Image (tube, coloured by chain):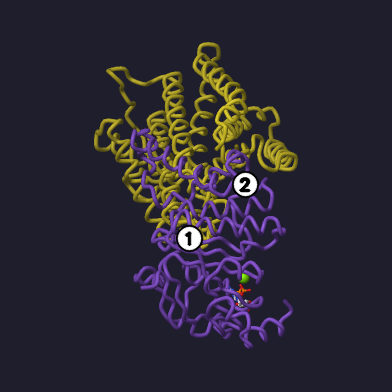
């Protein structure tokens, strides 16, 4: 039998350090708005939005190893579902969240069920198309406000307190990010989470040992979709106005970049990648017209020197 | 009734006929072997049995139940597990996580109960871990539970693949050249292990093997393949002196 004590000895210290770092980062995030101006809080809120989106996409790309090039579509499904229901039908914001989650599930099944039976590369193409279709639909329907977008989305209330200021939404997104991280961590360490990794590392061996690969992939794809849709609800509430241009292919790429940059797979790396993706444009503001060039060079450098991401998925 | 019953199985790729009307059976509790020169179609037969290849005709029954045409994961769930000729572990995952994969089809908790940390989900995780540890212990690599599978020695990787298949609690286990690449000492351990599988668990074993000595030692029945055809079948001492078998083996490079 394995000697449990020796394993504990070996893993206890790094785990202690990891939790200390995580707690310190959390404490920093909680007090941050007290020390910085509204602009920095705004940027930090965007960073938290990307943390949620990247954690969600990481389930698809990092856990299950599927390439999704249209992830922003599910973000849009959430934002528009919540936006339309509150602005046009007077729904309570909190009630729109389950509706948006259900809508994302349905969209995930429609796209995923036929595609995930095929070879993995087909998914990239189909999701790319899906991302564009959702955006074009949003541009052309009346109910979505067409190209100019949807305005007058209600601000959410909680226990009679209305979320209004940047700071309020900063904390709302912080709670959502923490919740998402908890959910991801719970699933990552469960039966279905392991199944995703089995399928990602060796699909045939996974099938041979009894894993339904299509079902496992579909569940990863749908769980990713649901997380993006919840982020979309809160995003719509924060902006009060949304337009199709918030959900472009570029948006999908940016989220994917965050996942890949941080090192696909584990949560700390993905959080780091998401924050980088949100901060890079701000940090490079001084570079003026050279910004795209500097961004590209910076990314190339990272990929050259840290091909597995900044904080790679090192198991065990 | 035999545990595994294969009848008139045919397989071809384009114009290439890989299996010609193969029929044989494996009794419950037996250790049987499948031998034959390289390219005879042994691995292809395993791939048909486990649902990876779609045969052109014939039938496959496991415990009387037709399994031909089912997806691989369904067949595993029905009690047929396998190892691969070229080891197929989840190399980037821990040894324990590898063996735990076998219990996937014997457990049921999904995403929602994992998020809610339901007591029954936690108990199930506990059980999956315990079963995994049991089989690691059975094949003798429990002390490596928390190492990466890819970091194990070649012999231990073979043991892990065996443990992983056993962890799906099959009725029949198919081993594709389990002794390939092992030294004499490791082969002896393997013979011992294969015997223990039957004696301690009652699981039926069908193995493909090149090493005639090993095959003669462990199996009570041998099926011989050549060019996709069954050329002999019977007890080791009978098959060994069968002129067609001798010719197949002398005629090939092996
Ligand atoms: N997927 C495949 N596509 C085409 N030919 C294949 C495929 N799998 C096996 N074969 C052919 O089937 C024959 C038998 O191969 P195999 O079953 O691996 O033999 P063995 O395991 O007895 O050495 C070989 O001629 C091989 O090239
Ligand atoms: Mg072979």
Q: Residues within 10 Å of mark 2 (few under 14, many from 20)?
A: many
Parent chain of label 2: B
Q: Please, is residue A30 above or below residue A95 in the view?
A: above
In terms of image quarters, where does ligand 1 lie? bottom right
Q: Quadrant of the N terminus of chain A?
A: top right
Q: Which mark is residue B81?
A: 1
1 vs 2, front mark? 1
Chain of the residue where label 1 is placed in the rendered structure: B
Tell me the element at label 1.
Answer: strand
Q: Is residue B97 above or below residue A231?
A: below
Say left or right for A81 vs B18.
Answer: left
**Where residue B117 sits: x, y (%)?**
37, 33
Residue B235 picture quarter: bottom right
Image coordinates of residue A29 in percent, x first then y, are 52, 19
Image: A229 above or below A49:
below
- Residue toward you, A111 or B51: B51
**Looking at the colours in the rendered structure, which chain would you say is drawn in yellow?**
A
In this view of the protein, can residue B6 be seen by the observer? yes
Quadrant of residue B36 within the rendered picture: bottom right
Question: Chain B's shade in the image?
Answer: purple
Pointers 1 and 2 in contact (CB under 8 A)? no
Quick check: is the Cβ at mark 1 less than 8 Å away from ligand 2?
Answer: no
Q: Which residue is mark 2?
A: B149
Viewed as shown, does residue A231 lie left or right of B190? left
First in residue order: circle 1 vs circle 2: 1
Q: Position of residue B22 (x, y in %)?
A: 49, 82
Q: Nearer the viewer, residue B61 or A1?
A: A1
């Amino acid at each position: 039998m394995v000697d449990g004590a020796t394993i504990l000895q070996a893993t206890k210290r790094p785990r202690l350090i990891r939790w200390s770092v995580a707690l310190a980062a959390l404490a920093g995030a909680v007090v941050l708005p007290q020390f910085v101006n509204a602009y920095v809080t705004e940027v930090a809120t965007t960073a938290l939005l990307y943390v949620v989106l990247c954690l969600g996409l990481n389930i698809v790309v990092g856990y299950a190893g599927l390439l999704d090039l249209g992830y922003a579509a599910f973000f849009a499904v959430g934002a528009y579902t919540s936006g339309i229901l509150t602005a046009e039908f007077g729904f309570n914001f909190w009630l729109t969240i389950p509706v948006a989650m259900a809508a994302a599930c349905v969209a995930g099944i429609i796209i995923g069920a036929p595609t995930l039976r095929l070879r993995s590369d087909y998914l990239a193409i189909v999701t790319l198309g899906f991302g564009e279709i959702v955006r074009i639909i949003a541009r052309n329907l009346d109910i979505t406000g067409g190209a100019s977008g949807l305005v007058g989305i209600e601000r959410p209330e909680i226990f009679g307190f209305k979320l209004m200021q940047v700071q309020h939404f900063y904390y709302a997104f912080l709670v959502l990010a923490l919740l998402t991280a908890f959910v991801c961590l719970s699933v990552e360490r469960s039966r279905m989470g392991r199944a995703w990794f089995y399928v990602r590392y060796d699909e045939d061996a996974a099938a041979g040992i009894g894993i339904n690969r299509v079902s496992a992939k579909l569940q990863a794809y749908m769980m990713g979709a649901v997380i993006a849709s919840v982020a979309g609800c809160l995003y719509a509430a924060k902006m009060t106005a949304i337009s199709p241009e918030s959900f472009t292919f570029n948006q999908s790429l940016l989220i994917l970049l965050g996942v890949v940059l941080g090192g696909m797979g584990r949560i700390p790396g993905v959080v780091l990648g998401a924050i980088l993706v949100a901060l890079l444009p701000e940090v490079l503001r001084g570079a003026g017209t050279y910004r795209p060039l500097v961004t590209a060079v910076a990314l190339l450098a990272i990929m050259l020197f840290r091909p597995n991401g900044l904080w790679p998925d090192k198991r065990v | 009734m035999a545990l595994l019953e294969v009848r008139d199985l045919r397989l071809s790729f384009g114009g290439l006929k890989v299996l010609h009307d193969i029929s044989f059976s494996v009794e419950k509790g037996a250790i049987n072997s499948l031998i034959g020169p390289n390219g005879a179609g042994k691995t292809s037969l395993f791939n048909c049995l486990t649902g990876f290849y779609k045969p052109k005709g014939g039938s496959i029954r496991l415990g009387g139940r037709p399994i031909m045409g089912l997806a691989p994961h369904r067949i595993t769930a029905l009690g047929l597990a396998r190892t691969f000729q070229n080891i197929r572990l989840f190399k980037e995952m821990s040894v324990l996580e590898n063996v735990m994969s076998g219990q996937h089809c014997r457990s049921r908790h999904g995403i929602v109960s994992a998020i809610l940390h339901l007591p029954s989900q936690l108990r199930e995780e506990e059980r999956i871990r315990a079963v995994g540890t049991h089989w690691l212990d059975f094949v003798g690599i429990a002390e490596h539970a928390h190492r990466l599978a890819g970091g194990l020695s070649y012999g231990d990787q073979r043991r892990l693949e065996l443990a992983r298949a056993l962890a799906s609690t099959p009725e029949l286990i198919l081993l594709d050249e389990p002794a390939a690449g092992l030294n004499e000492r490791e082969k002896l351990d393997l013979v011992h292990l294969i015997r223990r599988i039957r004696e301690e668990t009652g699981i039926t074993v069908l193995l493909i093997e090149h090493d005639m000595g090993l095959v003669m030692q462990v199996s009570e029945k041998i099926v011989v393949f050549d060019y996709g055809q069954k050329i002999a079948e019977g007890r080791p001492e009978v098959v060994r002196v069968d002129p067609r078998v001798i010719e197949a083996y002398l005629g090939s490079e092996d």
